[in-house]
């Protein structure tokens, strides 16, 4: 799949997404992706899929973000965070109710496709066939270590 690389040469990139409570920042070779309200459940869900590649590029960073967002949006039981302040004694309490099992809803690939289209928007061509592949939710920018097919990445 043809992708515009002119904006990727930048040393900084960022995305935020309110619905999935996520933020992504890339500074040169360092990428940071955070889901704020999941107690690391999304990372646990995708770490075996992504593995620990030696080095990934800017587009692959965006896919990690997309996959973390898709996992986060499919969580069935989310942690609940709260604060309480007792005005009588001045006591301030932070509390977190973490579900015993997070559980996940049935995977909807169109959600992943919509997230990928949002995250990759500035890099995608104006080609409806390629956009449909992205929207399907099954496109990938990552060549997995155990994948021997050199054409396995849809987004180069």
Image: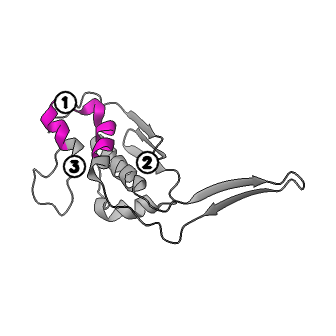
Q: Name the residue under label 2.
A: 33
Mark 1 or 2 closer to N-term? 2
Looking at the rendered image, the disc whose residue lies closer to the viewer, 1 or 2, is 1
Q: Which of 61 and 43 is in front in this view?
A: 43
| Magenta segment boundaries in residue numbering | 113-133
**Occupied quadrant, residue 6:** top left
**Can residue 127 be found in the magenta stretch?**
yes
Q: Residue at x 47, y 66 (%)?
A: 102
Q: Which residue is drawn at 28% across and 42% down?
A: 59
Sort mark 2 into few (<14), some (14-19) or many (20+) by Cα contacts within 10 Å.
Answer: many
Q: Quote the CA–CA distance across marks 3 and 1.
A: 16 Å
Is 115 displayed left or right of 88 in the figure?
left
Q: Nearer the viewer, residue 93 or 51?
A: 93
Where is residue 128 shown, x and y percent of the image? 15, 33
Q: Mark 1 points at which residue?
A: 125
Looking at the rendered image, the disc whose residue lies closer to the viewer, 3 or 2, is 3
Sort mark 3 into few (<14), some (14-19) or many (20+) by Cα contacts within 10 Å.
Answer: some
Q: Is the N terminus in the top left, top right, bottom left or bottom right quadrant? A: top left
- Disc 3 vs disc 2: Cβ atoms closer than 8 Å? no
- Which residue is farthest bottom? 100
Where is residue 145 shown, x and y percent of the image? 21, 60
Q: In this view, does 134 lie above or below 106?
A: above
**Occupied quadrant, residue 127:** top left
Please tell me whether mark 3 sits on a helix, a strand or a loop.
loop
Where is residue 21 shown, x and y percent of the image? 49, 46
**Occupied quadrant, residue 29:** top left
Q: Which residue is drawn at 71% across and 53% down?
A: 83
């Amino acid at each position: 799949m043809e992708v515009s690389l002119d904006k990727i040469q930048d040393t900084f990139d960022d995305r935020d997404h309110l619905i999935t409570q996520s933020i992504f920042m890339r500074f040169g070779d360092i990428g940071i992706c955070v889901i704020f309200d999941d107690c690391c459940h999304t990372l646990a869900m995708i770490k075996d899929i992504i593995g620990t590649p030696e080095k990934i590029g800017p587009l692959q960073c965006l896919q990690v973000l997309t996959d973390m967002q898709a996992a986060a949006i499919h969580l069935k039981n989310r942690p609940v965070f709260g604060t309480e302040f007792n005005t009588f004694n001045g006591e301030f309490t932070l509390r977190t109710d973490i579900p015993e099992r997070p559980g996940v809803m049935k995977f909807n690939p169109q959600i992943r496709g919509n997230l990928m289209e949002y995250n990759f928007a500035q890099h995608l061509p104006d080609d409806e066939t390629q956009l449909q592949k992205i929207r399907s939710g099954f496109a990938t920018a990552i060549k997995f270590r155990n994948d021997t097919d050199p054409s396995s990445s849809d987004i180069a």
